[in-house]
Image (cartoon, helix red, strand yellow):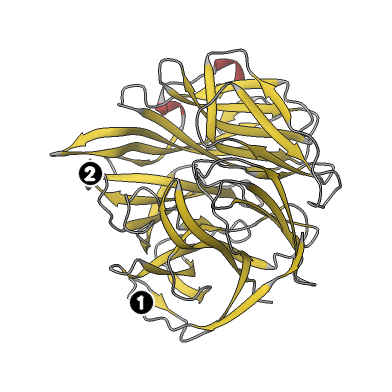
Amino acid sequence: MIGMLALVVLLSCNDQQTESNSETSEPEVTELVLADDGAWGYTGHHALMYRNKLFYSYLDSEGNTWVASYDPVTGDIVRSNIWEGEANLHSSNALVIRPDGRIQVFLDAGSYVDNKIRWKVSNESGEVAEFGDLQISEIDAPIVQGRQFYPVVHNPTGMMFLAVNAIHENSDRTAMMWISEDGGDSFNQVHELWSLGKDLRSNRSYTRVYAEDSGIHFATVRVGWNESVGEHEIGRVEGVYYIKYDVSEQAFIRASGEHSFELTDLPIFDADKLDNVWHWVEDGGGTSRALWSDIVADENGRPYVAFAVQNAVPQGVSTFHDGYWAHVDDRGEWSHHHIGKLARGWDNRPERKNYGLAIDPIDPMSVIVSRSTDFDQDLSRVVRMRSGNRGEDWTETEILSDEGRITTVVIPRLIDDSERSVAALWLEGRLEGWFDYNTGIKATPSNP
């Protein structure tokens, strides 16, 4: 299905109060409507720039999976409905561009179903009009998978890596890594990476990945979802952690360059084997928790991690998050810095549903966030913020959206030497919960 993109030009005033300086005043904001009915759940690779086109995936309000491309020159959008499912924003349905240029989409039902992974591949390179048959691979182990899929391609080798959230029969959560040596046609290796929350109730390990020539970068959070704090229970996160997988050495490396463990040492149950970026007690005082993260690496392979921190409140109570950005120095030691207040989340619902923070992979000193403008009306605005002194101070440099009911910010990742014609994507509309949503996907063109 091909249609011309709707352009909505809006005049926006920066009437929000922020903790940083602002260099913008009443800018003209151009918003691109990429889908009238579309949403994402867990943060994943939902937007990629390739051959000067934007490729993106989403769920509609009935739970159907769509893959689309947007041509910024013609304004044309091509869409394909590749899978029919149920409305469940736990689904990921993440995209990856294969070494042969075809688009591969990993599919899941939004729940922990079985020990299989499923995907479809477009019939033509750089096109989404038609996809092939459903492909399946499975692991011979008492593990079920779902909800978070992070596929990346390691360009020097052409290998595809897929990080997946999983759960053991005994309810221990873990992270898996599937490896395809033939660029996504088959997955001949699967490894259990780590299960870091074994001493926490309802333990989980949420993992994000980023690929560049030096290896595969991982950011993971160690979670106990029902931990007591004072007189109530919250989703407690013990820490944010980092490690890199060196593809040639088949070893996991700290940011300092030190070898930490080998592929043959997996799985890992000790968080000390990974770099500690942020800790529940040492950095959060035992009353704040870190939530969903984002990770990129610069051209030299140096990693950057962003995450949201929230003060402890009872489950079901909505509150603001604080955005944080972390980097390593020349010795490989991590430090984190406060960016500012983020938007609250989904329609006054539990505060954990918030993904309003992303690092710019082209300029890791820059982030795009959803910042609250009206707490009572649940309104926010997408803005770019940048630090010129390694995170010590952050300045709002660009307003990318008008005020609206906004959440889940995504920055497209560049797969080749394409110009990034789209600065950011986000969801706007009613987000009542995992199974009850009615949002559209909007975006902002990049400044020339």
Where residue 170 appears, as percent x and y from the top left, is 41, 15
Of marks 2 and 1, the one in the foreground? 1
Q: Nearer the viewer, residue 116 or 3?
A: 3
At label 2, which amino acid type do we have? Gly
First in sequence: mark 2 or mark 1? Answer: 1
Question: Image quarter for residue 263?
Answer: top right
Residue beneath the point at 64% across and 57% down: 412
Residue density around tag 1, few if under 14, some if 14–19, many if 20 or more, within 10 Å: few
Q: Secondary structure at mark 2?
A: loop
Q: Nearer the viewer, residue 341 or 47?
A: 47
Residue beneath the point at 35% across and 76% down: 16
Please identify the quadrant where the C terminus is shown. bottom right
Q: Is 146 above or below relative to 382?
A: above
Where residue 66 appears, as percent x and y from the top left, is 67, 50
Please identify the quadrant where the N terminus is shown. bottom right
The residue that label 1 is drawn on is 16
Label 2 to label 1: alpha-carbon separation: 29 Å
Where residue 264 appears, as percent x and y from the top left, is 60, 15
Q: Nearer the viewer, residue 425 or 154?
A: 425
Q: Is 448 above or below relative to 249?
A: below
Q: Is 70 above or below relative to 75?
A: above
Q: Secondary structure at mark 1?
A: loop
At label 1, which amino acid type do we have? Gln
Residue beneath the point at 46% across and 81% down: 23
The residue that label 2 is drawn on is 285
Instruction: Please say whether residue 214 is visible from this viewpoint.
Output: no
Q: Nearer the viewer, residue 379 or 290?
A: 379
Question: Image quarter for residue 222?
Answer: top left
